[in-house]
Amino acid sequence: MELCRHYRIPHSYYRGHGDGTWTDLDRRKARAYEDYLRQVCPQCGTRPQEWDETAGGDEDAYRATTHRCIGCQLIADKQKQIPEGDEGHGVKVALIPTSVHAALQVQHQH
């Protein structure tokens, strides 16, 4: 359903049936998927039912883990160098490939 939502196509068409016309079943599936997505916490990605034992969930359904993303670390380090105040307003940090950065440096030198 995620792909159907992204490409805005009926589920039946995605499965290779029909001509792309939305059937009643396609619409019901799309509404059910949208309802499901509304229940997902935007921060952690879980739904309350997954934790609620009375709803078939389990209070131990997930475990919290940690991992380090080197890209995010580089961004955070660079953000510390952004000046405070007006000079830093609107300044964004982005990752670009090293080869692109080198090409931009050469371009700026000429």
Image: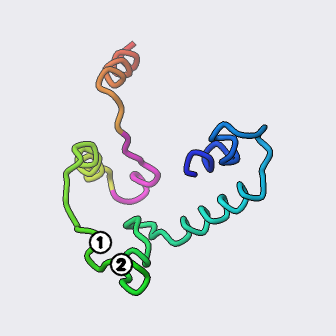
- The residue lying furthest to the top in this view is 110
Residue drawn at point x = 67 percent, y = 64 percent? 31
**Three-letter code for the amino acid on which mark 2 is drawn:** Trp
Q: Residues within 10 Å of mark 1 (few under 14, many from 20)?
A: few
Mark 2 and mark 1: Cα distance apart in space: 6 Å
SS class, disc 2 = helix
- Percent x, y of residue 14: 64, 41
Mark found first going from the N terminus, 2 or 1: 2
Answer with left or right where residue 21 lies relative to residue 41.
Answer: right
- Judge left or right: residue 25 versus residue 51: right
The magenta segment: 84-94
Residue farthest toward the front in the current orientation of the protein? 17
Can you identify the residue that label 1 sits on? 61
Taking depth in this image into account, of 16 and 103 the one nearest to the observer is 16
Residue identifier under label 2:
51
- Given residues 77 and 10, the one toward you in this image is 10
Tell me residue 30's x, y (percent): 66, 58
- Residue at the location (42% across, 48% down)? 91
Q: Residue furthest bottom?
A: 54
Q: Amino acid at mark 1?
A: Ala
Please give the name of the residue rendered at 26% of the width and 53% of the height, measured from the top-left corner: 80
Task: Assess whether residue 95 is covered by the magenta stretch.
Answer: no
Q: Is residue 91 magenta?
A: yes
Contact, CB < 8 Å: mark 2 with mark 1? yes
Q: Which mark is residue 73?
A: none
Relative side of 21 to 63, left or right: right
Q: Quadrant of residue 97?
A: top left
